[in-house]
Image (cartoon, helix red, strand yellow):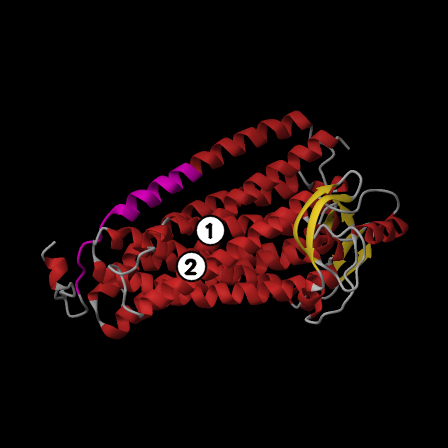
């Protein structure tokens, strides 16, 4: 198999997936926040909640639309660039993807249309139900896609027949223990992304004292939402790391640059590695901490790369069975570091909200606008760790990436499509940023309440501005 073609195919799938994953978490989280805001409007009949729902809903629709466009290409790549993978595992992998398209995507798109065009046309309860069904559809969509991905990480519920993996128990696919760590982690990561998105844009308007009646409650709701979400991401992430020690020990060893098996195992504070010679050039490690993280106790064995490599060679034959240690190590730290920074920021935001310091006494408010990039950094680095750390396997323990590529596709063909996709996706990303920035800066006009009369909720200070 042409190594250059395989490398280019991996780059192509990686580039398109990273682009797509910029949109997915915000879609998942912002749909729920918009639904919460409209719920408050229906329950309280206060017009500023309607304004909030429509303002953030407009940004949600922009993000959702471009997310759909970028996601379509990914599924075609399974047949074009990775046909051997599709042949080997298509009986299993195709089922959750088909369910996602037929159930979740149609649920999202139909009820999003009703929500967009149903203002003042649908009964308010039905209109509210529409956006909640959009939010539900987004989560269901994530579940089925992650069910397919989790099989690649931890294959279950299959038998091997005629050189292919064939589904034996569908129930095993949806109860995969890897899925039930990955799914809630992804959902709460989406909630975190939306919380920082809303806080960052609200901070922009609060600094300019525009529509404080809209953006102060927006910031407050997002701060509460964000504290819960970030805390859940960290707790579930800790559980995922413990599961990784059992199910994918090589990924954990690479993420910690752990060359030798240790008990108790030390946590790397910082390591510079020489992968060719499998050694640390420089390292500072904290004794026992990795065992604590892996087993919640001061002792516990964490297997090292050398032992796992030797075991893999005995089982699967000669070859390299560990991923890029440098990539795994630093993406893990970027993800965790971003998460800790977000936790500190959102706790500070909630403290200021509870003290009633929005906006005048909130001294660090201006930093929340650039901080909306933090969840994107964490999401992207986390995805790279998840997929890169599985290498050299595309289906863990059963199919190597080098054996999954399409034999009839040449390197020049992939190179051209890679360049085209990268250019088009870059343009789409530019369109997304432009539209979001454009509509973010527009100060929403006053809305009317449920009784048809405009509700004046602005303070005297705002009316004089």
- State the mark number for residue 252: none
Is residue 191 visible in the rendered image? The answer is: no
Residue 270 locus on image (x, y percent): 65, 49
Of 92 and 326, the residue lying toward us: 326
Left/right of residue 389 with respect to residue 54 in the rendered view = right
Of 398 and 128, the residue lying toward us: 398
- State the mark number for residue 374: 1
Is residue 449 visible in the rendered image? The answer is: yes
Left/right of residue 52 with respect to residue 371 in the rendered view = left
Left/right of residue 194 with respect to residue 167 in the rendered view = left
Of 258 and 113, the residue lying toward us: 258
**What residue do we see at 47% from left, 35% from top?**
426
Is label 1 in a helix, a strand or a loop? helix
Of 94 and 178, the residue lying toward us: 178
Assess whether residue 432 is covered by the magenta stretch: yes
Assess whether residue 12 is covered by the magenta stretch: no
Residue 102 locus on image (x, y percent): 53, 57
- Eye-nearest disc, 2 or 1: 2
Residue 122 locus on image (x, y percent): 27, 65
- State the mark number for residue 345: 2
Q: What stretch is highlighted in magenta?
A: 429-448
Our reading of the magenta stretch's main secondary structure is helix
The answer to whether the residue labelled 2 contacts the one labelled 1, judged by CB atoms less than 8 Å apart, is: yes
Please tell me whether residue 235 is drawn above or below residue 97 in the rendered image.
Answer: below
* Label 1 crowd bin: few (<14), some (14–19), many (20+), radius 10 Å: many
**What residue do we see at 88% from left, 52% from top?**
315
């Amino acid at each position: 198999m042409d190594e250059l073609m395989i490398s280019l195919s991996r780059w192509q799938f990686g580039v398109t997936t990273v682009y797509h994953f910029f949109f997915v978490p915000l879609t998942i989280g912002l749909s729920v926040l918009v639904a919460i805001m409209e719920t408050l409007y229906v329950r309280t009949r206060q017009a500023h909640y309607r304004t909030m729902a429509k303002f953030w809903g407009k940004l949600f629709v922009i993000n959702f639309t471009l997310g759909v466009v970028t996601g379509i290409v990914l599924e075609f790549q399974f047949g074009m660039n990775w046909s051997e993978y599709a042949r080997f595992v298509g009986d299993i992998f195709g089922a959750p993807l088909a369910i996602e398209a037929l159930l979740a995507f149609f649920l999202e798109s139909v009820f999003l249309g009703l929500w967009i065009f149903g203002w003042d046309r649908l009964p308010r309860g039905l209109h509210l139900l529409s956006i909640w069904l959009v939010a539900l559809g987004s989560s269901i969509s994530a579940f089925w896609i992650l069910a397919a991905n989790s099989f690649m990480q931890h294959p279950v519920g299959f038998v091997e027949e005629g050189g292919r993996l064939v589904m034996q128990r569908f129930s095993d696919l949806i109860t995969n223990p890897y899925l039930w760590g990955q799914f809630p982690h992804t959902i709460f990561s989406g909630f975190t992304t939306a919380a920082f998105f809303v806080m960052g844009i609200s901070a922009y308007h609060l600094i300019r004292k525009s529509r404080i009646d809209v953006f102060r409650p927006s910031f407050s709701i997002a701060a509460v939402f964000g504290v819960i979400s970030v805390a859940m991401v960290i707790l579930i992430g800790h559980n995922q790391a413990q599961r990784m020690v059992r199910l994918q020990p090589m990924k954990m060893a690479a993420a910690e640059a752990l060359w030798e098996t240790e008990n108790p195992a030390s946590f790397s504070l910082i390591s510079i590695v020489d992968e060719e010679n499998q050694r640390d050039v420089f390292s500072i490690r904290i004794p026992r901490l990795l065992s604590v993280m892996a087993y919640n106790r001061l002792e516990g064995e964490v297997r090292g790369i050398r032992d796992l490599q030797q075991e893999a060679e005995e089982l699967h034959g000669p070859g390299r069975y560990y991923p890029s240690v440098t990539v795994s190590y630093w993406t893990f730290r970027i993800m965790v570091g971003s998460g800790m920074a977000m936790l500190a920021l959102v706790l500070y935001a909630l403290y200021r909200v509870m003290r009633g310091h929005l906006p005048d006494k909130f001294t660090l408010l201006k930093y929340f606008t650039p901080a909306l990039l933090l969840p994107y950094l964490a999401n992207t680095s986390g995805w790279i760790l998840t997929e890169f750390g599985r290498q050299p396997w595309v289906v863990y323990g059963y199919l190597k990436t080098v054996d999954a590529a399409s034999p009839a596709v040449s390197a020049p063909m992939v190179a051209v499509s890679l360049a085209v996709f990268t250019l088009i996706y870059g343009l789409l990303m530019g369109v997304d940023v432009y539209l979001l920035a454009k509509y973010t800066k527009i100060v929403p006009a006053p809305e009317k309440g449920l009784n048809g009369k405009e509700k004046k909720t602005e303070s005297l200070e705002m009316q004089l501005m």
